[in-house]
Amino acid sequence: MRIVLGENRYGKAETRLVRVDRGADAHHVTDLTVTTALAGDLARTHLTGDNSGVLPTDTQKNTVFAFARDGIGDVESFALRLARHFVDTVPTVHRARVHIDAHSWDRVAVGGAPSHHSFRRAAGTRCATVTVDGDATHVVSGVDDLVLMNTTDSQFHGFLRDSYTTLPEATDRILATAVSARWRHGSADAPADGWSTAFDDALRNLVEAFADTPSLSLQQTLYAMGERVLTHRVELCEVRLALPNKHHFLVDLAPFGLDNPGEVFFAPDRPYGLIEGTVLRDDAAPAEIAW
Amino acid sequence: MRIVLGENRYGKAETRLVRVDRGADAHHVTDLTVTTALAGDLARTHLTGDNSGVLPTDTQKNTVFAFARDGIGDVESFALRLARHFVDTVPTVHRARVHIDAHSWDRVAVGGAPSHHSFRRAAGTRCATVTVDGDATHVVSGVDDLVLMNTTDSQFHGFLRDSYTTLPEATDRILATAVSARWRHGSADAPADGWSTAFDDALRNLVEAFADTPSLSLQQTLYAMGERVLTHRVELCEVRLALPNKHHFLVDLAPFGLDNPGEVFFAPDRPYGLIEGTVLRDDAAPAEIAW
Amino acid sequence: MRIVLGENRYGKAETRLVRVDRGADAHHVTDLTVTTALAGDLARTHLTGDNSGVLPTDTQKNTVFAFARDGIGDVESFALRLARHFVDTVPTVHRARVHIDAHSWDRVAVGGAPSHHSFRRAAGTRCATVTVDGDATHVVSGVDDLVLMNTTDSQFHGFLRDSYTTLPEATDRILATAVSARWRHGSADAPADGWSTAFDDALRNLVEAFADTPSLSLQQTLYAMGERVLTHRVELCEVRLALPNKHHFLVDLAPFGLDNPGEVFFAPDRPYGLIEGTVLRDDAAPAEIAW
Amino acid sequence: MRIVLGENRYGKAETRLVRVDRGADAHHVTDLTVTTALAGDLARTHLTGDNSGVLPTDTQKNTVFAFARDGIGDVESFALRLARHFVDTVPTVHRARVHIDAHSWDRVAVGGAPSHHSFRRAAGTRCATVTVDGDATHVVSGVDDLVLMNTTDSQFHGFLRDSYTTLPEATDRILATAVSARWRHGSADAPADGWSTAFDDALRNLVEAFADTPSLSLQQTLYAMGERVLTHRVELCEVRLALPNKHHFLVDLAPFGLDNPGEVFFAPDRPYGLIEGTVLRDDAAPAEIAW
């Protein structure tokens, strides 16, 4: 009944890195938030304060900046370079997880033409999480802050009722959510069309499945989104989705002598439904990773 | 040396209203956060708790929803309807301020065609603030959460130095800001091209002035932005801008044997510069309003 | 109908400064967020990009850190030192506003005794805003993030009704708010009992007035809070309060065969009431400042 | 290579529940944010939209409110009641996770005496997470938003250096963190001294271990915190801690002719170190739960 150290990891969270590529024709901006986490033979620092095996988190941050000097490329590639570096060069580190959020910028138009060096921040965050664990490498891509709404073609009825159920059946409701999606690649090699085209295509499939699936429940929509992505992207083996059900309640205008034929809604912040699910190929190899 | 009640107002803040217009060809979404504030003969509730002159904030919220039943239209128009209603119908209310944030949604594409009823939240918030004060009416339009970046054509040098100054002169820096802009209309009548076209045009001018003004200081850019809007929109009399200077610091890579020719930057959160200014026509009538 | 520059100011926002006083018996922590804003003869940088009159915001940040080397003392004193420095030493600067948020830390107990050097962050932020405008100096103290609740002794009835009013009268409700309070000193000299004792006393009076005022409206509570502070603190001339009415709605449990005698409440985030008001002495000299 | 549904769950997130106990001598407030998540035979709603096995999230919210009518008691007890209810009464549900955040309120003093019914929100959030999985029940207690600082007795040196390491060795630094801690109970029965006394004691041990452990690394402090809790609370089997290293950098005042003997610090927001670790008894039975 001794007390012992269990799983542990450490790293530098949320390093804000911006890189400018000054192309002849136009500048390009890469705007990232990078988080590194390392694990391995780290018991000594926990048990005795012997730091001889601890690469400082400050060094991890420096490495992020230094590696950016050579160019960043796709976020999956950059995360792979960093994670492999830590596992390959730090003797005590057996496992590295690098998570990158890539913030979106659109090129501004000036006088109708695309600007050379002016940008506007757009909605949506592309992300990549690479885990290198000894010889195994896992790549997960994904998206956050993707807020979607269907104003019709969503129903919810025929559900289980108990003595605490008061919800009326809905045959036409608003369906809104803030998608948090992650998709795992079957291999650490870049897809044939490249990481970024693959990302765009997965994202397009996610959004289109949300938009054109007649929905009997948000669960059904979730499964359709995951299935659509896996159907179109053969290199992927697993999709995980977390979909808050951002409720829109029809306002009762009867006290004011008004009807409300599906037009005026109140959108509360909390509580909200939260639907979480995994869609995968039945032959997907399991991966012990922090998503 | 008596203690007395001074300026006061009250209202309902941040009512979340979503309206769906179910057009034959396509649905349209209006997603607003509405804040009302009323002032007038309200001393009794403060001094004695006599509420006979107090229209409840709950009623103000109800009014927002009920008025939306007839259609919302431009946010300036909706704010005008609401503000005038409170001043015209509530005997104790002499002044009403209605502020609306309009959240942006883009229509999703499915199979290359615009969707009938699916939308994605976009960056940027259009806002309108209407103040009705007795017979006077003031309309202010604006934008928040407009994050812009120029990767070159920005300098900052020749500044005042004292014994606490260590900043090096910069002849080529990143200029980034999150624009908060407000522009005051000379009249409460809609511009000739309508509130929404006028908004789009003002916004375009703001962004283009940011993008194509070679900048010697963020102050110079601020003035150029305000001047550009006033030059192109004759119905406007005053522009107010708050521009945080979102610093991007070149990372010193020399310790790692690397140069850094304007490519790798660190983007801290705080502190940040904050440049605030007003640009106006010299014949603009003053307006005693809360912007 | 020329376009001209109107009011403007610039500065460094949210410099995060922590100072440790290493007393023989115990350490003391001062944890501040400091914002400076300067105004004066600054037209040239706006109009031509000539920065010769612009003390960089980076220098303002340096000044904050350098001045802290001598000790910080009360936040009002520190803000006064900084604001006077900028107006006295920068030729172009005629007006300086320094706003400080002081974050609260409690000393931790270890084995029942107060720790020498360990602290825990507490709720509530004390703040001070000093404006030096030529020869005039204005000091405002205040508090933010002071969240208070009364579970009884609050009513709201007898209010104005119109055709949009559905709110029932309440004879016993929860009253909850997040106080944002500012109180203006009649002089820039420290109160007889010192800035910090004066702050503690004003805060105590605010809280006690909230707690022991039987409330017929949040407006009545607001006035009582301001009046109590002014009654007890003769050096103050004006109190401004912004009180969100954080609604707590009694949940209707009847569908589950249960009554609800004032016990179970739902606390939504938005919308909320917002009551704002000023209480002042009738001989208070006006102050043209940004609160 | 079929596409299949993997792990999934759904529930109502962040129901805001406030309960007032109107004791004869004093009122008591319980202020909770409750999140429920259910899993089981839910494939049909995902695959076909057949909702006959889906208890609506709205019903889960109703259940939270209805159960509060009987009194809440300790948050662990309330979470146990709710989780068992869902598993026991909903045929399709085999597993329920209920997470509760309990927001802290202090009783206000009026005239030196504790108020009967007035409260002030305090820092720190106590939490409980109960997972009922078939016959197995797991109880985790914890705390969030516990921000701690030591102004001395923290060092960091002797660490691993590579070509990206520039960090100087520190023999006296500020150590600050925002503790997120979870401790797992070996049994679902209440500790002998009750859930709340046990919580207070665990929290006290956490804080005291942070305060009186001379620290050679934040990892060492983390382990000491977990070990201290397990040593004093025999009913616990595992402690998990996430400790951001909230850096405080000594400001270089030399450019202003000043030294800085450990007094003036800059506290950036990002990046920050993040140290995560588990401390457990070596005979702790594993628990497959979402912490």
Image (cartoon, coloured by chain):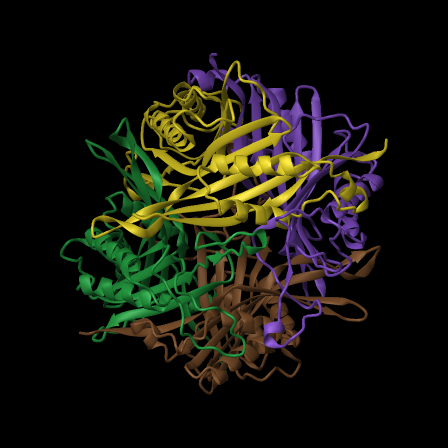
Chain colours: A purple, B brown, C green, D yellow
Residue nearest the viewer, comparing A99 with C219: C219
Q: Residue at x 54, y 37 (%)?
A: D81
User: Is residue C218 shown to the viewer in this render?
Assistant: yes
User: Is residue A72 shown to the viewer in this render?
Assistant: no
In the image, farthest residue toward the top? A1
Report whether B187 appears left or right of A279: left
Q: Against B217, is B199 above or below?
A: below
In the image, farthest residue toward the right? D1
- Residue D180 is situated, as x and y percent measured from the top left of the image, at 47, 34
In the image, farthest residue toward the front? C257
Q: Against B50, is A203 above or below?
A: above
- Residue C212 is situated, as x and y percent measured from the top left of the image, at 27, 58
Q: Residue at x 73, y 61 (%)?
A: A151
- Residue D169 is situated, as x and y percent measured from the top left of the image, at 40, 25
Count the marks: how many? 0
Q: Residue at x 47, y 38 (%)?
A: D75
Which quarter of the image is occupied by the N terminus of chain D? top right
Q: Against C7, is D272 above or below?
A: above
Report whether C81 appears left or right of C254: left
- Residue A105 is situated, as x and y percent measured from the top left of the image, at 65, 52
Report whether B115 appears left or right of C22: right
In terms of image quadrants, where is residue A140? top right
Which quarter of the image is occupied by the C terminus of chain D? top right
Q: Against A137, is C20 above or below?
A: below
In the image, farthest residue toward the left? C192
Residue nearest the viewer, comparing A2 with A253: A253
